[in-house]
Amino acid sequence: ETLWEFERPTNHVGFTVLARLSHDAFFRPGQGANDPFFAEWAMRLPVLLAGAASILALVWCCRALGLGQGLGWIALGYVAHPWVLRFGSDARGYGLVLLLLPLLMGAAWRAVRTGNWRWWLAMAGAQFYLIWTHVSAVLVVAAIQGMVALLILRSDRAHRAALAGRWAVANVLSAMLFLQLFAPCIPQ
């Protein structure tokens, strides 16, 4: 039910799964007539943690991109924007998007720069969970993947084939996982 009851595009599946796991782990409904049926705090906990972690992720992304720690701290001011604060605590998937975008960008940059499989797999995981959480983020992922393609084309010829192969494998793994988990939601 949590994975495939995608009745409207407003159901952020990636968040719903985490909220269900959190709620089941931290709350047991009471048996009395006045006992609460669910705990809102337990449902909001994953997005609250993701929203808080997004601040650190943004600083890490700025440093990974070589923008320096100073620009990362300026980015912290941006994170204090009212909409970012709201989405970082709202019981929706937006807080996860705030976390996953800088992680995806930083991992993609490091993957191309180092060629290390760890960063390619981190990029694949972040883009999978980002699109699974908020399907319309596919446009942002496409833009980031376009950047990766340009960086690969600009890399030295000796490493270009290896980078392109790893990029293809990471994207295929990400797409396979997304299609397996999201395909049952499409007819709805």
Image: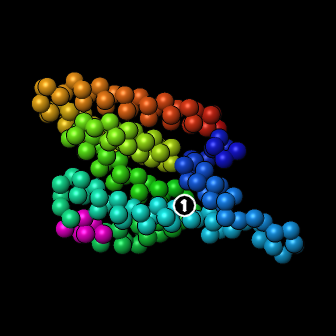
**Position of residue 52 measured from the top left corner of the image (x, y, whole percent):** 43, 67
Q: Is residue 91 above or below residue 65?
A: below
Q: Which residues are magenta?
A: 70-76
User: Which is more toward the observer, 10 or 170?
Assistant: 170
Residue that appears at 44% across and 54% down: 97
User: Which is more toward the observer, 121 or 181?
Assistant: 121
Q: Is residue 122 left or right of residue 87?
A: left
Q: Is residue 76 left or right of residue 3?
A: left
Label 1, secondary structure: give it.
Answer: helix
Task: Examine the residues drawn in magenta and state their main secondary structure.
Answer: helix
Residue 9: in magenta span: no
Residue that appears at 22% across and 40% down: 114
**Position of residue 137 measured from the top left corner of the image (x, y, whole percent):** 42, 46
Give the amino acid at mark 1.
Pro
Q: Quadrant of the N terminus?
A: top right
Q: Is residue 73 above or below residue 3?
A: below
Residue that appears at 51% across and 66% down: 48
Residue that appears at 38% across and 32% down: 171
Q: Is residue 16 left or right of residue 33?
A: left
Residue 71: in magenta span: yes
The quarter holding residue 18 reads bottom right
User: Does residue 10 appear in the picture of this structure?
Assistant: no
Residue sitting at the far left: 156
Q: Is residue 110 above or below residue 174?
A: below
Label 1 environment density (alpha carbons within 10 Å; few <14, some 14–19, many ≥20): many
